[in-house]
Amino acid sequence: VGVFFRPVEKISAVIETYPKGIAGFRRYTELLDTRPDIADALDARPAPALRGEIRYEQVRFGYGTGRPVLDGVELRIAAGHTVAFVGPSGAGKTTLCSLLPRFYEVQGGRITIDGIDIRQMTLASLRAQIGIVQQDVFLFAGTLRENIAYGRLGASEAEILEAARRARLDQLIEQLPEGLDTLIGERGVKLSGGQKQRLAIARIFLKNPPILILDEATSALDTETERAIQQSLTELAEGRTTLVIAHRLATVRNADRIVVVDRSGISAQGTHAELMQRNALYQRLNGAQAELLA
Ligand code: ATP
């Protein structure tokens, strides 16, 4: 299973030595941005407010010296549309998505947003406009308020509460005697898997980016929690260009377009109905999913 923020693992030991709370965390995020191999181009400019029309043009990328994971990838996503990526494990779905916030740099071709090559944008201004929801929600020792506010440092109390409401965290907050001041993490309240997902969603509502990447959970949340989270994610995706690394049939069926990724790159694109008619791999994946979900 792919993970976007691989550097987090490497420096996770560092964070524990930082002072608790938001000040320490800010430094931590600065660390996260200092990958020596990916930096602002000399002529990089802050990106304008993006609409979110995305194009991959002849994109090539590989991790090592071996065969590239992606080669000649052509992809166009209209602003505000949702695209679901499906395909076998290891095919390159995560890799494809992680090129957009430039966690890795394309080795051939280019990626544009609203017609601008993403390498022409400063990293900070690019990443400020992309929200990412992953399976592993990153929480730090601090209050619920601080953990939500990580979506946009400096957000007001009203904005934090509004984001919590939209992510349906408000019930939890009302139940806790200390509300938003409740400490979470090792020395505080332990959040359930579903609550962590909601917290991640609240952060993105607060950040309000035009572009969203969803790495759909493969793992265990009970069905009811799952459905409720799904509903919040659908609301989150509304009006944003959304790339979903999809594991669920329902997500795939609701997407504007489905992109089938296999080891040779993108092997087909279309709607659910179209792909069911003409793509053998998609039919197989659907069969397997349907069995799992049955
Ligand atoms: P999954 O559904 O399991 O998450 P995926 O389709 O998202 O799979 P990727 O995670 O993009 O696939 O992986 C594509 C290929 O690149 C795999 O062969 C994987 O082993 C390799 N790969 C992924 N991340 C790295 C990395 N950081 N370093 C080296 N190889 C990697």
Image: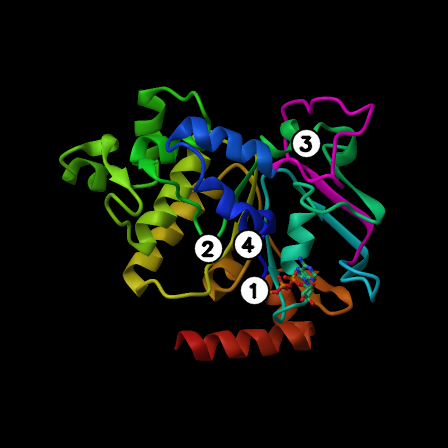
Residue 60 part of the magenta-drawn span: yes
117 left or right of 7? right
Q: Is residue 209 visible?
A: no
Q: CA distance from mark 4 to mark 1?
A: 22 Å
Task: Name the element at disc 2.
Answer: loop
Q: CA distance from mark 3 to mark 2?
A: 24 Å
Give amino acid for label 1. Answer: Val
Give amino acid for label 4. Answer: Ala
Pick the front one: 258 or 135: 135
Label 3 sits on residue: 123
Which span of residues is magenta-colored?
33-62
Label 4 sits on residue: 255
Q: How is the image coloured?
A: rainbow
> On residue 1, which mark appears?
1
188 left or right of 268? left
Q: CA distance from mark 3 to mark 1?
A: 25 Å
Ligand 1 within 8 angstroms of badge 1 C-beta: yes
Q: How many marks?
A: 4
Looking at the picture, how far across and down is residue 172, in whole percent? 21, 42
Task: Name the element at disc 4.
Answer: loop
Residue located 39% across and 77% down the image:
294
> On residue 135, which mark appears?
2
Whether the residues at callouts 2 and 1 have beta carbons within 8 Å, the answer is yes
Graded by Cα atoms within 10 Å as few (under 14), some (14 to 19) or many (20 or more), the crowding at tag 4 reads many
